[in-house]
Amino acid sequence: METKAERLKFTELIVWQKAHQVFLDIANDVDSFPKKKTADIIISQLIRSCSSISANIAEGNARHRGKEYEHYLIIARGSLAETENWLIKCRDLGYMEDTVFEKRMAILTEVLKMLNKMIGQLRKA
């Protein structure tokens, strides 16, 4: 049995839209980071992990199968945790202001709740 999320195109999913928006926000944030080797490494990891959230939501949605979709949502959830880790490092190194950090973390928390709900629904289906 398909869930509603499996019938929608990935761009119609609010969870994907929010994950994509946080990627766009972070991509803009890193432009103001210092030109240091450490910052370059963190930027690379942060962009990779953040872009992976929406990418895995999209790929899972395209699979149209409960277990496969669930698998990709779990990967997206892992990428979200990794993104939080890198954001904490950015804040602690002074690359990101607390207000910006809190905004990014708040959106990621929303995405995490949505992912957890979707994973739960797929497990019940």
Image: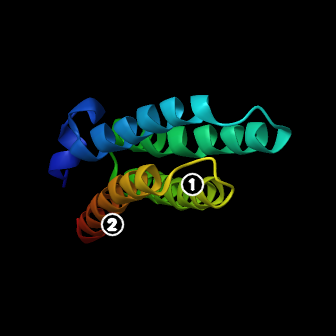
Residue 27: image location, x then y, percent: 52, 32
Count the marks.
2
Q: Secondary structure at mark 1?
A: helix
124 and 42: which is toward the camera: 42
Q: Secondary structure at mark 2?
A: helix
- The crowd level at tag 1 (other Cα within 10 Å; few <14, some 14-19, many 20+) is many
Q: Residue furthest right?
A: 37
Q: Residue at x 29, y 69 (%)?
A: 120
Q: Residue at x 34, y 59 (%)?
A: 106
119 versus 87 height, above or below:
below
The amino acid marked with disc number 1 is Leu
51 versus 100 height, above or below:
above
Question: Relative to residue 21, is residue 85 drawn left or right?
Answer: right
- The crowd level at tag 2 (other Cα within 10 Å; few <14, some 14-19, many 20+) is some
- Distance (Cα) linking label 1 and label 2: 21 Å
Q: Which residue is mark 2?
A: 116
Question: Relative to residue 12, is residue 102 drawn left or right?
Answer: right
Camera-nearest label, 1 or 2: 1
Residue 72: image location, x then y, percent: 46, 51
Q: Which residue is mark 1?
A: 87
29 and 11: which is toward the camera: 29
Residue 12: image location, x then y, percent: 20, 34
Image quarter hosting the N terminus: bottom left
Q: Residue at x 27, y 59 (%)?
A: 114
Residue 100: image location, x then y, percent: 43, 49
18 and 28: which is toward the camera: 28
The amino acid marked with disc number 2 is Asn
Question: Relative to residue 10, is residue 84 drawn left or right?
Answer: right
